[in-house]
Structure formats: structure tokens, C-alpha cells
Image: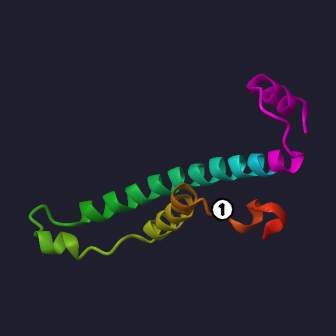
Amino acid sequence: MSFGQTIRMLKSRARPVDPEEWLRKDARAAWTKKTVAALREARERCDAAWDRLMKALPEDASDDEVDAVKPPPEQAEVDTLHALIDEVVQHDRWPRELYWGGI
């Protein structure tokens, strides 16, 4: 357990925990930050792609023509990242490497 972790634990008046638990929690926090940042970047690229697709349509495009526009490839990346985050938020299912022993 690092000095900072020890201080945080003492300040919170928490009982001592297994150092591996701290490592796992830190790894999950790092994964979350990295994944949310990737989602934010992918969302920006996806929004730009959707803007290009919608601007390519004629101004008088019907609802059917708008509905027929296929999602840009960037949408798949956003959907994948969102599904990963949703598994954590809704079901507490983390990527395999973030469990004890990678189970």
C-alpha cells in the first residue's frame, strides 16, 4: 500500500484492506478514466461524421431519406465503448483483467 493510500484510508477512518484490493480499485479507476476519455474522443469524431452525412442531404430531404442514412463507421466504436461502460454501471461487470487473478 502506498503512503498516499495509507493516508487516505486513515483520513476516511476505514479499516485496513488488502493491498491487492487497493491495486484492483486503482486499476479500475484508471480503466474507467481511460475508457471514458476514449468514449469522449470517439463521440466527437462520430458527431462530426454524422454532421457531414446530414449536411450531404438535400435541404428538402424527406423523413424517409433521413432515416435511410446509414450510421458512419465511427458509430460502431462509440457503441462498443458505451457497451463496456454500461456493463460496469448496470451490472458491475468489469473487463477480465480487472478482477483478482484475471478470472
| Residue 3 magenta | yes
Kind of residue at disc 1: Trp
Instruction: Name the residue: 90% across, 35% down.
Output: 2
| Residue 33 magenta | no
Instruction: Name the residue: 20% across, 66% down.
Output: 57
Give SS at disc 1: loop
Residue 5 horizontal side relative to residue 57, left or right: right
Instruction: Name the residue: 36% across, 71% down.
Output: 71
**Is disc 1 surrounded by few (<14), some (14 to 19) or many (20+) residues within 10 Å?**
some
Per the image, the residue denoted by label 1 is: 94
> In what quadrant of the picture does the C terminus appear?
bottom right
Q: Residue 44, how many percent across, how many down?
A: 45, 52
Q: Which residue lies furthest to the front in this view?
A: 15
Instruction: Name the residue: 68% across, 65% down.
Output: 95
Q: Residue furthest top?
A: 11
**Magenta-drawn stretch, dominant element (helix, strand or loop):** helix
Q: Residue 68, how many percent across, how many down?
A: 23, 76
Residue 71 horizontal side relative to residue 102, left or right: left
Foreground: 77 or 73?
A: 77
**On screen, 30 above or below 52?**
above
Display colour scheme: rainbow
Q: Which residues, given as a range, are shown in magenta?
A: 1-23
Q: Residue 86, how many percent across, how many down?
A: 51, 60
Foreground: 37 or 60?
A: 37
